[in-house]
Amino acid sequence: MRTSLVLLSARLLDPVTGAFLPQTALAVSGGRISALGDDRATRALADSSTTVIDMKGAVVTPGLVDGHLHPVSGAELTQGLDLSGCADLDAVREALAREVRTLAPGAWLHGWGLDPNVFGDRPVEAAALAPVLDGIPALLLLFDAHSMLASPRALELAGVDGPRTFDQAAEVVCDAAGRPTGLLLEDAACELVERAAPRPTHAERRDQLAVTLREMAATGLTGGHAMDANGDSLALYAELDAAGELPLRLRVAPWCQPGTDDDALRALIEQQGAGGRLWRTAGVKLFMDGTIDNGTAWLERPDCHGESTHAFWPDTAAYTHVIGELHRAGVPTATHAIGDAAVRHALDSVEKARATGAGPVRHRIEHIETVPDDTVRRFAELDVIASMQPTHCCDFTRADHTDNWSRRLGEERAARAWRCRDLWDAGTTVVLGSDWPIAPYPPLTVMAGARHRRPTRDLTQPAHGPGQALTALEALQAMTVNAAYAAGEEQEAGRLAVGHRADLTAFAESPLTTPAADLADLPVVLTVLDGRPTHRAPSL
């Protein structure tokens, strides 16, 4: 098999030991690392058709993988007005007013990244944004993507004029008179209004997804665990893959929602393994709760507003049954569980499934924002992977616990925020991700946040729970070898070894010696997927 790519004069970094390999060059054939050696011997493997790149001492690691992201929905949602930089209501109103002036008559305004902390002690409701949105159909997605503010005109166009009943823990929040306040909690409620808004065409969505994925590759990402397969997501991946325009290797987990019957569950099982050259369906995504910020998490004790007391699945035994059926079928699961009660129930369900004696299946829990000590140790005992997003802690909470998330939980539980260190030390496999579009996707920002736990926009601020920080090597492992293990691919991914996939990320300097405060700005000089460069800096 011909050699398609050769990298010379490189520093090859082993993410397991943190040391550089003795070799300085690698060759790629058929999308796999085919040789590791010195420059002279490796160059000899090239022919006239081989891409040969002098790395000039750049540091090469296995390709970075985001353990939790939403490429298709994120590419669509982030086309609206970015409100993530607004720190108070005045800034939100000013941003909305500017956007309104650009709208054609009758056009909808879409915003995203709205931080509930801007409302302070006020209720999160559309009235706080009047009169800016008077007469304007507007949908403003809160940063958690589990809640949305709809303007009065948007509610009117959607015919939403009072409370609704759902099969899952969702709500059209209403005032004492039964009138909607504009706050919609969870997907089922949000979709009531989203259906009334214009949607981009399939071609527009495909083109925007392609742009987004290329931008991700330029930040060093070679892969991602995509936590949804909604709508035509799989068709979009297939189209890009067939056209040679898929720059990330994607592992896609379709959703299983409350009310899923036996036929739908069988369909999810039969769907496993479907895909193309660079993407495949693997695993199932479930939700055990919502979010702490909007009061829909499932906590063992209510939050300060008396909320976050219920599971997303009204019948929690049905969730346990589904986990058992998927486990027996050999299907790994990924459960969104943020509150302590949600995490505990997810672990209980995995324990019951494992007791059936079925073969080993790698289940995982996503987010894990606050848990007590006895829950931490159970992850390793049950071999449940902890998929965590440290930038959520960095950018949406504060060290002094004056943020909405911390105030809702109170001091005791807020002090147990994102226990990455404790889970790691307990022997848990920790995988890091962004949950994009909830937080930015650049993997170096994610790794930096795991190390410094400070607000990304102002690293002079104190860290939230500095004792829960990971080391530089651990952060790298969490996006390479651990991500491969979580996907059941440790024999072919996550290492620089002959026979492993040629998914590679290269940096100007070592991410292990770059200070955490500087890591997000470390230049990514090359990204390689399946032996093909998807990003190459001009310096190379």
Image: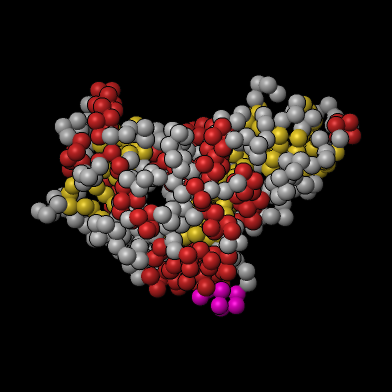
299 relative to 367, above or below:
below
Q: Position of residue 373 (x, y in %)?
A: 47, 65
Name the residue located 71 percent from the left edge and 45 percent from the top edge: 18
Q: In which quarter of the image is the N terminus?
A: top right
Asked where in the image residue 314 lies, by quadrant, the reply is: bottom left
Residue 356 covered by magenta stretch: yes
Q: In the rendered image, is residue 27 in sight?
A: no
Q: Is residue 178 left or right of residue 513?
A: left
Q: Where is residue 502 in the image (x, y as percent from the top left)?
A: 72, 42
Q: Where is residue 299 in the image (x, y as percent from the top left)?
A: 35, 63
Name the residue located 62 percent from the left edge and 31 percent from the top edge: 524
Residue 304 covered by magenta stretch: no
Name the residue located 69 percent from the left edge and 55 percent from the top edge: 490
Q: Is residue 316 left or right of residue 514?
A: left
Extreme-left residue of the structure: 177
Name the residue located 14 percent from the left edge and 52 percent from the top edge: 175
Q: Which sits in the foreground, 294 or 522? A: 522
Q: In the rendered image, is residue 351 in sight?
A: yes
Region of the chain picked out in magenta, as a range:
352-358
Q: Is residue 400 left or right of residue 364?
A: left
Q: Which colour scheme is used?
A: secondary structure
366 relative to 249, above or below:
below
Q: Which sits in the foreground, 168 or 426? A: 426
